[in-house]
């Protein structure tokens, strides 16, 4: 269940429950994400999970393409962070994950992102006391008593299915504005145009760039210039006050 929690500011929280474990996902801003990541350690990936998510159905009709995933994540958590790798990916959503068990609450950092056309997660264990922090350059096995390898797999699989259900439930809502995003390293374009979500891959750079130009000719650009006048005025006024 999605909630908007009023603190000093509004913050998005999603609550889920699976196998008698309650989960809370809190959207983080970039500054919060950077600070929490310093006090974290990377949990080793289950690389086969991504393949299982994509290929669990014989015809894969239930799975979402990148455009559908991007729109669903944006509707759920707000706009993507800008901290993604611009060559390999096109979005990232940093989240605080609270794993709530009878033994206590356990804090984790989750990144939801795309890389070279794949939908992926990173999971980090958070340490509230800096004295407990490991060498955060290491990658370790899951903490079995808190959030086991199997529980991580079950939760991420459940969350992916949850996203599919959200997308299907939102089909009756107003459709998104046309958009396009690109992944340069894999020559992938995806977006929403002519009432369709699309994801297109190209064999090399030339047809990829031709496709970008084709979309640009109908007003779809991967990079939309922003009016930065208000930001400039804010910076200038702050400098003047100091």
Image (cartoon, helix red, strand yellow):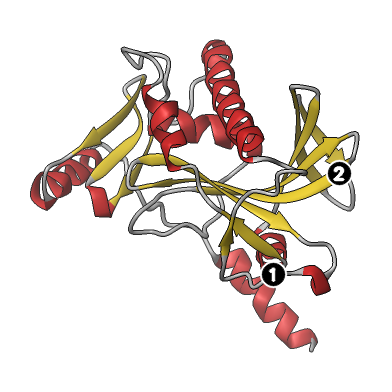
SS for callout 2: strand
Is residue 233 shown left or right of residue 157? right
Q: Is residue 172 left or right of residue 102?
A: left
Name the residue: 16% across, 49% down.
209
In terms of image quadrants, where is residue 41?
bottom right
- Within-10-Å neighbours for mark 2: few <14, some 14–19, many 20+: few
Query: Is residue 210 or residue 86 the one in the foreground?
Result: 86
**Quarter the C terminus occupies:** bottom right
Could you tell me residue 176's position as x and y percent?
A: 48, 27
Q: Nearer the viewer, residue 181 or 234?
A: 181
The number of numbered discs placed on residues in the rendered structure image is 2
Could you say which disc has been placed on residue 156 in the image?
Answer: none
Please state if 54 lies on the left or on the right of 84 as rendered.
Answer: left
What residue is shown at x 80% (from left), y 35% (from top)?
4
**What residue does disc 2 label?**
105
The image shows residue 192 at horizontal and vertical percentages of 37, 29
Q: Considering only order in the chain, which callout, 1 or 2, is on the residue closer to the N terminus?
A: 2
Measuring 78% from the left and 44% from the top, which residue is drawn there?
Answer: 11
The quadrant of the image that shows the N terminus is top right
Q: Is residue 159 found left or right of 56 in the rendered image? A: right
In the rendered view, tell whether residue 239 sits above or below residue 11. below
Question: Residue 162: percent from the left, percent from the top?
Answer: 60, 22
Residue under label 1, please give it. 134
The mark closer to the camera, 2 or 1, is 1
Comparing 14 with 43, the one in front is 43
Q: CA distance from mark 2 to mark 1?
A: 20 Å
In the rendered view, tell whether residue 134 sits above or below residue 21.
Answer: below
- At a point 52% along the width and 60% down the height, the residue shown is 83
From the top left corner, tell me how far across and down residue 191 is, in percent.
36, 34
């Amino acid at each position: 269940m999605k909630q908007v929690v009023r603190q000093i500011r509004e913050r998005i929280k999603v609550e889920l429950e699976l196998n008698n474990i309650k989960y809370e996902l809190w959207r983080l801003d970039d500054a919060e994400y950077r600070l929490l990541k310093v006090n974290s350690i990377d949990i080793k990936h289950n690389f086969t999970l991504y393949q299982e998510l994509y290929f669990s159905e014989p015809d894969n009709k239930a799975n979402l393409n990148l455009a559908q995933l991007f729109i669903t994540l944006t509707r759920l958590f707000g706009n993507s962070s800008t901290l993604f790798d611009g060559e390999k990916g096109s979005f990232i959503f940093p989240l605080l994950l609270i794993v709530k068990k009878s033994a206590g609450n356990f804090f984790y950092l989750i990144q939801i992102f795309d890389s070279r056309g794949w939908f992926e997660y990173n999971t980090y264990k958070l340490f509230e006391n800096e004295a407990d922090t490991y060498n955060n350059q290491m990658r370790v096995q899951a903490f079995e008593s808190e959030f086991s390898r199997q529980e991580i797999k079950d939760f991420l699989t459940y969350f992916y299915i949850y996203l599919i259900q959200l997308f299907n439930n939102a089909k009756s809502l107003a459709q998104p504005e046309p958009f396009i995003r690109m992944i340069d390293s894999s020559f992938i374009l995806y977006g929403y145009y002519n009432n369709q979500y699309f994801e297109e891959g190209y064999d090399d750079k030339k047809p990829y760039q031709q496709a970008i130009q084709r979309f640009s000719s109908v007003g779809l650009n991967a990079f939309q210039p922003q009016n930065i006048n208000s930001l400039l005025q804010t910076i200038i006024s702050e400098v003047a006050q100091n």
